[in-house]
Image (cartoon, rainbow, N blue to C red):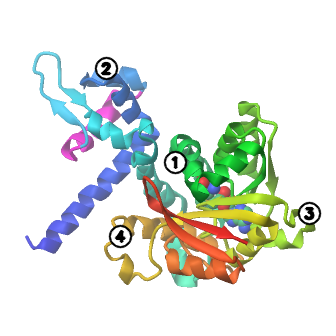
Amino acid sequence: MTDFSDKLVQILNYGSLNLALGIGYALNIFDVMDEKGCALSLGELSKATGLNARYLKEWLGIMVTGGIVEMAENPDDGDTFLLPSGHGDLLCTRAGNNNLGVYTQEIPLLTACAMAAVKQGFQTGRGVDFSNYPDFQAFMSELAEAKHRKVLIPEFIPYVDQGRLEKRLQQGIRVCDLGCGQGVAACLMAQAYPRSEFVGMDNHETALEQARNLSESYGLSNVEFINQDAAKICEETKFRQLFDYVCAFDAIHDQSHPLDALKGVKYMLRDGGLFSMIDIKASTSIKDNADHPMGPFLYTVSLMHCMPVGLNDNGSGLGMMWGKQQAVDLLRQAGFAKVCAEEIPNDAFNLHFLCTP
Ligand SMILES: C[S@@+](CC[C@H](N)C(=O)[O-])C[C@H]1O[C@@H](n2cnc3c(N)ncnc32)[C@H](O)[C@@H]1O
């Protein structure tokens, strides 16, 4: 076979594995196998997961032939299946920032949500309405849990502005989490810094309801969640110079009017305030992304969600791979005096754009 033919065969196998990994992750099978920490028979796995043995057996066929799960033949007691702990380090919820397992759900989920609408978009050039993605906010919240829970308070905040932000948060400042989704980051910060006050801002009411429930379950009184279109912040004088710190985690590139949103951030910041925009680490040019280790994955997520959602309402449709150069340019156009694009320790996916008004 030619190299390219080998490559296509691999693509068929890896694409299938992605789907099956996504199913296994969503059904919690990896966490169960990892927590058991030993080889399990099919019956034991079925009992431990509460899942049907026939379906599990077919799924295990994919996992074993794909090199994810190790199988030991046992003629007396039946075959057993083991998730090596090194695989669990990257596939299970305990992996925190290293958890790649959670991402295996993304392409299957987006395909189920938007395959037909995206194909139509190729004909019409129109965007895809957010309502096509009913399960996406829940997934984003799961991703936020995986991303933020282990790193936001112990690693990310202490690193911002060389530790000065953490001190200010401990003393008490006003913070806005823009595009807060289901509120995971805002709640974690509100819990860690009780003297500071937090506002989570989003225009997705269902996500905001979840965020309010999360805050209630934490027993927090220093965080509120408000419905606000980021593109219209400057129309509301109540937001003028209201905050000392604004953060936006993965929340600018899929907005329809990102420049207006960034102008809104600047409008909301007091003198001496700070803005952290955390967004995908990539270059603006496709050519410069040719060696990006996750290029096809990230461009696909963008094609299936970020870019078409950003085209709605005559939007700019930046997409997830808008890249560092375009991001810096837009931040400057929004009027930020200082824009600094930094690597984030232990985070290969994102860049931190630290801006002052
Ligand atoms: C990819 S999610 C990120 C959520 C969260 N920051 C996180 O880290 O999990 C992007 C969020 O931006 C919100 N968003 C998109 N356009 C918006 C707009 N015009 N105004 C306010 N929020 C917006 C979406 O509703 C969504 O919750």
Q: Which mark is residue 156?
A: none
**Residue beneath label 1, please?**
147
State whether residue 109 is above or below residue 172.
below
The magenta span reads 51-67
Instruction: State the image coordinates of residue 205 (x, y, percent, origin top left).
Output: 76, 53
Bin the neighbour count of mark 3 within 10 Å (Cα to Cα): few under 14, some 14-19, many 20 and up. Answer: few
81 horizontally vs 195: left or right: left
- Along the polypeptide, which appears first: circle 1 or circle 2? 2
**Residue beneath label 4, please?**
292
Report how far apart the C-alphas of labels 2 and 3 lie in the structure.
Answer: 59 Å
Instruction: State the image coordinates of residue 294 (x, y, percent, origin top left).
Output: 37, 64
- Along the polypeptide, which appears first: circle 2 or circle 4? 2
- Along the polypeptide, which appears first: circle 1 or circle 4? 1
- Is residue 60 a member of the stretch shown in magenta? yes
Which residue is painted at 34% across and 30% down in the image?
34
Tag 1: residue type? Lys
Residue 303 in sight in this render: yes
Instruction: State the image coordinates of residue 180 (x, y, percent, origin top left).
Output: 69, 54
**Residue beneath label 2, please?**
44
- Along the polypeptide, which appears first: circle 4 or circle 3? 3
